[in-house]
Image (tube, grey):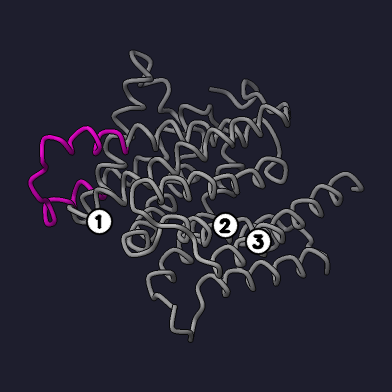
Amino acid sequence: MATSEIDNTDRPMIGIAWMLVTMFWFVSLDSMAKYLMQSYPVAQVVWARFFFHVVFVMIAMGFSVRQQIKTQSIILQCARSFFMLTTTVLFFVGLHFLPLATASTIMFVSPIFVTILSVFLLGEKVGVRRWAGVVAGFTGAIVVVRPGFQGFDWSALFVLAAAFTHAFYQIFTRKARLYDSPITSLFYTGLVGAVLMTGVVPFYWQTVAVSDYLLLVSLGLAGGVGHLCLIRAFQSAPASVVAPFSYSSLIWATLYGYILFSDLPDRWTLIGASLIIGSGLYIFHRERVTRESG
């Protein structure tokens, strides 16, 4: 698809709606993954997430698959896919040990990383107020992770690293809208993960119970649908408009965590989440003000 055919019109309310739906699918994916990792290796669960993601997208493409997988920026698309794989592996390792709501809260730091990386990757200027928001956000992350305290869990560092790599994925996703259609980006989102994990998973494979096959396939479906919604969200509106609504995932994570694993976020997680969310909202507000005044 030619660049001129890509729809770059900003539609804020539609973008926000897409982001809210995105969070439901992503937390559903995380919940299924955490459940499956109680019985299967992380590598096997990650493989299913990406392999069936690609299968789902190719089925959706139908007979036009050859045309749809053509990209104007193969390096950009493969970079997105690589960072998605890295994020998933890091997050799933941490999620295996952490409560769902706690892991989701730590991932909230990702938009703060986006602000920092935008200085180096996009050449954006970040003022004192936005840097203050970044500091507040990291303070919230420290409250949740609690390094040096009795409640500290090393697995939280995996999720924090996942938030960092996910920031790269977010930046490249915003760039990809200038070159390719959503379905093309969706295909490449899972491609590197599917290829690499197919080579790795035989060394970790465990026999799958019949009742779990549907869940393994559903990982790819939830990931595919979720990322399609995410791509639509960033295509419909600026990142500073839609990204704050990713915080709605805490609601779903708390609900799933309680129903499936009898977990509820503790006091420190809630305090840290308040700081991270508050700082994130302030950063997005400053970005909007800066954009409008510029």
* Spatial CA span between label 3 and label 2: 10 Å
Answer with mark 2 or mark 1, whichever residue precedes in sequence: 1
Quarter of the image for residue 65 reads top left
Q: Magenta stretch containing residue 29, yes or no?
A: no
- Which stretch appears magenta? 196-219
Residue at the image position 32 percent from the left and 36 percent from the top: 220
* Spatial CA span between label 1 and label 3: 30 Å
Q: Which residue is mark 1?
A: 42
- Callout 3: few (<14), some (14-19), or many (20+) C-alpha neighbours within 10 Å? some
* Spatial CA span between label 2 and label 1: 22 Å
Q: Position of residue 52 (x, y in %)?
A: 28, 34
Quarter of the image for residue 283 reads bottom right
Query: Is the residue 226 above or below the residue 1 in the image?
Result: below
Q: Which residue is mark 3?
A: 274
- Callout 1: few (<14), some (14-19), or many (20+) C-alpha neighbours within 10 Å? many
Q: Magenta stretch containing residue 202, yes or no?
A: yes
Looking at the image, how many numbered discs can be counted on the residues?
3
Compare residues 246 and 73 and report the one nearer the observer: 246
Q: Nearer the viewer, mark 3 or mark 2?
A: 3
- Callout 2: few (<14), some (14-19), or many (20+) C-alpha neighbours within 10 Å? many
Answer with mark 1 or mark 3, whichever residue precedes in sequence: 1
Q: Position of residue 173 (x, y in %)?
A: 55, 42
Residue at the image position 49 percent from the left and 44 percent from the top: 252
Q: Position of residue 159 (x, y in %)?
A: 44, 63
Q: Which mark is residue 95?
A: none
Residue at the image position 24 percent from the left and 48 percent from the top: 36
Query: Looking at the picture, which amino acid does disc 2 mark?
Result: Phe
Left/right placement of residue 213 relative to residue 178 reads: left
Q: Main secondary structure of the magenta part?
A: helix
